[in-house]
Image (cartoon, grey):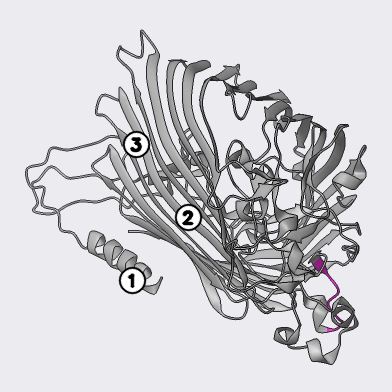
């Protein structure tokens, strides 16, 4: 990691030291460009200092945005987290990079028609999440987080335009954290190469990227003596003394993607606003559960083992997707529709037999489908975004997804957002098939039904106190879950969920209070999806400029809380969540408080917080999962540094 950091810094300095001789250059006076060259009367290059508006990024289907270098309160939620996201509605075990317990129901599109274990999904970067850049000068950024006990996490980006029409970027993230408990090492990394090109006429545009990502974790199965942890036994003051259930197990997830999207406008776009887009991508996922020896925690008798089966198991999936679309685009109306062809595989390396019938070694099919997008903008007050995808195959059945979002402004600075989303898809491939040396963990969910999720909801944004009020309703048919033994099941009746809450910020001079409240209830089949009834967060802070306005400071305290509930358990063999077992217990009802001070100096941010300050004066009794405690008091450091050369 340190060598990559050195190379990126060297590149930025070399690019900054380049000498340009433009003695014969003609004057350029384009208003949108802050880089200006003189008439050539002097043997020098006249350069106006670039502004932040010259440093832009976008995802493929979003508008360009400037690099955000403003010290806002929400950044303390983002850059204090190693995945650089606001993790409200989740709780983390005692190591970064080890996943989360989701406290609210979530739909992850990356799990559709692919193999992606739920607890490995929090680090995954989807195709629509990859950033493409447009910068006037070579640009680098570094985001650093300290780890638990030993290690660190560093995300570095280097991007540069070659000419005005082509940009390339290299991004690398490396994470290694030992964790507070035995056998809990996390070692994650990803590398992204991306490029964006626009022709001189603007009639041709290309987006491309390659992503290589690994999410690797040691698995300890949780602590064995919860009574000693909860009582604050002196032998547990060093968490490395705590006994854990697994001694030689680990899990690996590998995620690789090649992606190319290019669009051509054959005619004058002013008269004939039609374009043709072609997207081709290939994605490969692999999941391993590794052991160096049999784990007695998983079996009682030798008859519960599969003779001759390897200790390490492997699953994989592949998806080759090819899409051609026709696009109509003007200022107020955009429609694109196309056809998609897919080749999908899902398989296992080692086959076992159940009742004399062997499991299939590989499931595969060719699929044909259609995709469409609609965007409508009216009077700068109403905006509609709709998406539809449908495909069909013989093995994994039909797939249907539609999202519909309506945003309008009935009164200036007051916004209403409404959504109606629906998805019907085959269960995530981790539910379909598994083989293991342990008999109890071998299953084949043959003839599974599509799980259907309907979501209706919306939010209202009010100018008063920057308030947002939201409400959502979910109906899940054929809900797919793992029971307490780790076997996949599908519910006969629907699971219905209601959510309501809000977010507001109250300010008085330089003092501010941001609060977020989330109430939820599983209306039917509560035992299949246990969740806390309430999740809340409060952030009281002071913000001011300092050192003759050379710096900006935030200082405050954050409190995070979720009510007590009978949580699902973490199941390391599958990296999924299973229903509570006989020795399970309820978690929650323990506030998690952090005290912090953040600082911004030019384009550098420092996020320093003392996490779990309550454990300094009392025993830590908070859990992320049953048998998996939350971290103790620690000094958490995050550093964000932008280099605009």
Image quadrant where one finds the C terminus: bottom left
Q: Is residue 492 above or below residue 623?
A: above
Between disc 3 and disc 2, the foreground one is 2
Asked whether 499 or 447 is in front, the reply is: 447
* Residue 622 highlighted magenta (yes or no): yes
Q: Position of residue 139 (x, y in %)?
A: 36, 55
Q: CA distance from mark 2 to mark 1?
A: 22 Å
Q: CA distance from mark 3 to mark 2?
A: 37 Å
Give the extent of the magenta segment.
617-623
Q: Residue at x 51, y 48 (%)?
A: 285
Q: Residue at x 88, y 32 (%)?
A: 493
Q: Which residue is mark 2?
A: 213
Q: Earlier in the sequence, mark 3 or mark 1?
A: 1
What is the residue that sits farthest to the bottom in this orientation?
234
Q: Which residue is mark 3?
A: 32
Residues at discs 2 and 1 in contact (Cβ within 8 Å): no
* Residue 177 highlighted magenta (yes or no): no
What is the residue that sits farthest to the top in this orientation?
271
Q: Is residue 625 above or below residue 146?
A: above
Q: Which labelled disc corresponds to residue 6?
A: 1
Residues at discs 3 and 1 in contact (Cβ within 8 Å): no
Q: Can residue 547 be seen in this snapshot? A: no
Residue 511 found in image quarter:
bottom right
Q: Position of residue 492 (x, y in %)?
A: 86, 32
């Amino acid at each position: 990691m340190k060598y990559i950091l050195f190379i990126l810094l060297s590149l930025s300095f070399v690019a900054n030291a380049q000498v340009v001789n433009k003695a014969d250059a003609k004057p350029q006076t384009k208003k949108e460009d802050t880089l200006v060259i003189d008439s050539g009367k002097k043997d020098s290059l006249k350069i106006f200092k670039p502004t932040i508006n010259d440093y832009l990024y976008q995802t493929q289907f979003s508008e360009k945005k400037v690099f955000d270098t403003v010290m806002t309160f929400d950044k303390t939620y983002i850059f204090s987290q190693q995945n650089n996201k606001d993790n409200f509605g989740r709780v983390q075990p005692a190591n970064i990079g080890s996943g989360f317990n989701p406290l609210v129901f979530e739909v992850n599109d990356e799990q559709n028609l692919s193999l992606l274990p739920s607890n490995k999904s929090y680090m995954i970067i989807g195709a629509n999440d990859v950033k493409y850049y447009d910068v006037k000068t070579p640009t680098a950024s570094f985001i650093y987080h300290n780890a638990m006990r030993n290690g660190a996490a560093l995300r570095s980006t280097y991007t540069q335009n070659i000419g005005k029409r082509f940009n390339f970027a290299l991004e690398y993230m490396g994470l290694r954290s030992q964790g507070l408990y035995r056998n809990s090492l996390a070692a994650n990394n990803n590398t992204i190469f991306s490029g964006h090109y626009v022709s001189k006429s603007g009639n041709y545009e290309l987006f491309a990227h390659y992503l290589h990502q690994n999410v690797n974790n040691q698995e300890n199965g949780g602590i064995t003596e919860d009574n000693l942890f909860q009582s604050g036994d002196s032998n547990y003051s060093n968490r490395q003394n705590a006994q854990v259930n697994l001694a030689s197990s680990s899990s690996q997830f590998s995620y690789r993607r090649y992606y190319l999207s290019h669009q051509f406008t054959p005619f004058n776009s002013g008269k004939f606003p039609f374009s043709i887009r072609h997207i081709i991508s290939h994605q490969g996922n692999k999941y391993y559960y590794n052991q160096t020896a049999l784990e007695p925690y998983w079996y009682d008798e030798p008859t519960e083992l599969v003779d001759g089966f390897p200790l390490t198991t492997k699953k994989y999936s592949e998806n080759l997707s090819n899409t051609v679309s026709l696009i109509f685009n003007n200022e107020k109306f955009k429609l694109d529709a196309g056809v998609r062809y897919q080749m999908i595989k899902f398989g296992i390396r080692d086959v076992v037999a159940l009742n004399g019938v062997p499991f299939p070694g590989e499931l595969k099919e060719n699929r044909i489908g259609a995709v469409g997008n609609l965007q409508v903008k009216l009077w700068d007050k109403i905006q509609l975004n709709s998406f539809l995808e449908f495909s069909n195959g013989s093995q994994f059945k039909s797939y249907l997804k539609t999202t519909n979002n309506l945003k309008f402004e009935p009164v200036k600075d007051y916004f209403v957002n409404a959504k109606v989303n629906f998805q019907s898809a085959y269960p995530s491939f981790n539910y379909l098939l598994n083989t293991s040396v342990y008999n109890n963990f071998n299953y084949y969910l043959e003839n599974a039904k599509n799980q259907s999720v309907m979501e209706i909801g919306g939010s209202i944004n009010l100018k008063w106190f920057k308030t947002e009020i939201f409400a959502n309703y979910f109906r899940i048919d054929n809900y797919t879950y793992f029971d307490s033994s780790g076997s996949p099941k599908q519910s006969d009746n629907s699971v219905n969920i209601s959510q309501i809450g809000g977010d507001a910020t109250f300010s008085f001079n330089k003092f501010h209070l941001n609060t977020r409240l989330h109430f939820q209830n599983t209306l039917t089949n509560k035992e299949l999806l246990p969740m806390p009834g309430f999740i809340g967060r409060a952030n009281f802070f002071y913000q001011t400029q300092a050192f003759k306005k050379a710096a900006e400071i935030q200082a405050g305290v954050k409190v995070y809380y979720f009510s007590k509930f009978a949580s699902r358990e973490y199941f390391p063999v599958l990296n999924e969540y299973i229903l509570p077992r006989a020795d399970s217990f309820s978690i929650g009802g323990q506030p998690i408080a952090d005290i912090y001070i953040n600082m911004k100096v030019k384009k550098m941010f420092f996020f320093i917080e003392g996490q779990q300050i309550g454990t300094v004066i009392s025993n830590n009794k908070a859990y992320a999962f049953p048998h998996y405690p939350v971290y103790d008091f620690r000094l958490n450091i995050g550093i964000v540094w932008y280099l605009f050369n």
